[in-house]
Image (cartoon, rainbow, N blue to C red):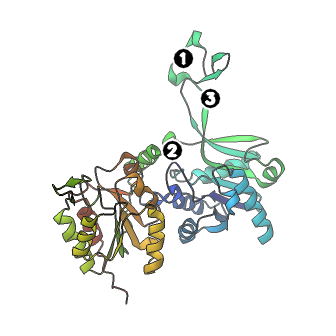
Amino acid sequence: MATFALIPARGGSKGIPRKNLQLVGGRPLVVHSIAHARACAAIDRVFVSTDDDEIARVSAAAGAEIIVRPPHLAGDTASTESAMQHAVDTWRTTGSPPDAIVLLQATSPFRSAGQLDGALAEFKRSGCDSLLSVARFHGFVWRTSATGARPFTYEPTARPRRQDIRDIVLETGSFYITRRELFERDGARLGGNIVTWEVPSNDALDIDEPSDLLRARAEARRRGMMGELPLGGIEWLVLDVDGTLTDGAMYYGESGDELKRFCTRDGHGIARFRANGGRVAFITGESSRAVARRAEKLAVDHVVLGCRDKAAAIVDLCRRFRVAPSAVVAMGDDINDLPMVGRVAAFAAPADAHPDVLAVADWIAERPGGDGAVRELLDLVEAARVRVPRAA
């Protein structure tokens, strides 16, 4: 039975910017699912369906084949089933479609060893039409309606202990296995004779909100999965200014001049990074003479003042200086820095950054902005022995 894995991974995400490229355990989310699929002997080929060039590049480097998804199937309202149908159509035009499709969710980074092998073995043994991953659930569930509420998992007159609630499971979303003929007939990932495959509860984490990402990173640390930040080939350091290179406060002199407090240690780190061949950019939403003077003193290579679109600024920097996003590391502290997330090799934050920024940062400094946070990051870069010859 020919079996293909399909991992939908679109570029847009409102809850977590660039979600499918967020690092968990030292690797992008989408790469976890690719690795799990490739490790399963029963899966013949692994595909990532995406509309995003960077996701495609990362996925291909991890060993996946790429299905380029058209924009109208990659918006916020596009269904997973539409991506599946597009994949089936693509397989038909390029060769024989598979007998079975293993749909893997990119935002589920934890699957125990042998989990997919076991699920596929059960899929074949049982002769079922579709299978889904589930986790045991011992909660008290109620169903609400306009006429009131009713218990769903127990009887209030004979309230059980939590451990006595049996045969209730939750769909994890981690993976589904579907006969291709069933999918083409019904247009749904589940149907016909459906079988469940139980997974451990700590494998059932699905990343949707920033708090989920924090939990996933904590779980990765608990499992000893934390890899090194990808700093070995860094050529550029991109920095926000207020709250990152400064403490975020605004100081005004008697004459109305705006003053900013910069950290000398950060300056020494920047100077050493540049002396070793690195380049530095300041990208800030403020238009400040103090920032311009500080950039001039540190011989900063590229300065963008009054920036309103930091994602576009990153794209412009990479194009103008012919540098790959994988060779750029950035640091920011506030919500307007979030568009840089996922568009560089790693995104770092000072210890006192906004909670939404801390939730998605690949690395968080021990020190606050304006007090050595940038130096901490640059010390990591130096520890990776970055020595990049300056381009002619």
Q: Position of residue 371 (x, y in %)?
A: 20, 57
Which tag, 1 or 2, sits closer to the chain's start?
1
Which image quadrant for residue 197? Answer: top right
Q: Secondary structure at mark 2?
A: loop
CB under 8 Å between discs 1 and 3: no
- Whole-angstrom CA distance, mark 1 to mark 3, is 14 Å
Which callout, 1 or 2, points to the residue nearer the camera? 2
Above or below, 343 against 137 in this view is below
Q: Position of residue 269 (x, y in %)?
A: 22, 70
Residue in the picture at 60% in, 18% down? 154
Q: Amino acid at mark 1?
A: Pro
Residue in the picture at 19% in, 70% down? 268
**Residue at the outermost bottom position:** 392
Residue 205 has which mark? 2
Above or below, 328 against 241 in this view is below
Residue in the picture at 67% in, 52% down? 120
Which tag, 1 or 3, sits closer to the chain's start?
1
- Whole-angstrom CA distance, mark 1 to mark 2, is 27 Å
Q: Secondary structure at mark 3?
A: loop
Q: Amino acid at mark 3?
A: Asp
Q: Amino acid at mark 2?
A: Leu
Residue corresponding to mark 3: 167
Q: Position of residue 71 (x, y in %)?
A: 67, 61
Residue 28 has which mark? none
Residue corresponding to mark 1: 160
